[in-house]
Image (cartoon, helix red, strand yellow):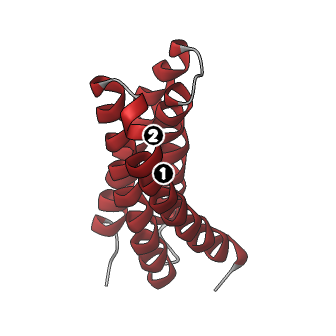
Amino acid sequence: MNNTRRFLLGAAALILLLATLLGAYGTHGLRDSLTAAAWEAYETAIAYQFYHGLGMLGVTVVAQRYPESRLIAVSAWLLLAGVILFCGSIYATTFGAPSGVGSIAPLGGIAFMLGWLALGVGLAGIRS
């Protein structure tokens, strides 16, 4: 396994750890101090972080199996970017960043979509 894939697997594990920590903190220490809308956004960020962290694990394993597909490899990086931009901007606004920071979230959503598209196109292009 090369260093890039090892990094992506480690990043996925860290993303899942942070999702677990932030979820627990949110439920036990933050929930009562947020508005209903802010809590809903926070829960969405946690859920997307879990889904895409697990996705990064899977995509990186698939990329190991099909190293000739650049698109499959790129898809893991796009999912990582999505977690940082989408989830990160929601967390930042939850913890007091200016509301304008939240305008970054759609870029993260686009990165998620492009990541899954890259995986699909990359897999479709594999010739067995």
Crowding at label 2, few (<14), some or many (≥20) Cα neighbours within 10 Å?
A: some
Q: Is residue 27 above or below residue 93?
A: below
Mark 2–mark 1 CB contact (< 8 Å)? yes
Q: Quadrant of the N terminus?
A: bottom right
Query: In the image, 98: left or right of 120?
Result: right
Percent x, y for residue 114? 38, 44
Residue 82 coordinates in the image, percent (x, y): 47, 44
Residue 30 numbered mark, or none: 2
Q: Can you give x and y, in whole percent of width and height, for residue 61 in the image?
A: 46, 79
Q: Is residue 1 left or right of residue 15?
A: right
- Residue 105 image point, x, y percent: 44, 29
What residue is shown at x 32% (from left), y 41% (from top)? 44
Decide: few, some or many residues near mark 1? Use Cα within 10 Å; few <14, some 14-19, many ≥20.
few
Q: Is residue 98 above or below residue 80?
A: above
Give the residue type at disc 2. Answer: Leu
Query: Quick one: SS at disc 1?
Result: helix
| Mark number displayed over residue 25 | 1
**Residue found at x 46% / y 32%:** 90
The amino acid at mark 1 is Tyr
- Mark linked to residue 77: none
Q: How many marks?
A: 2
Q: Quadrant of residue 57?
A: bottom left
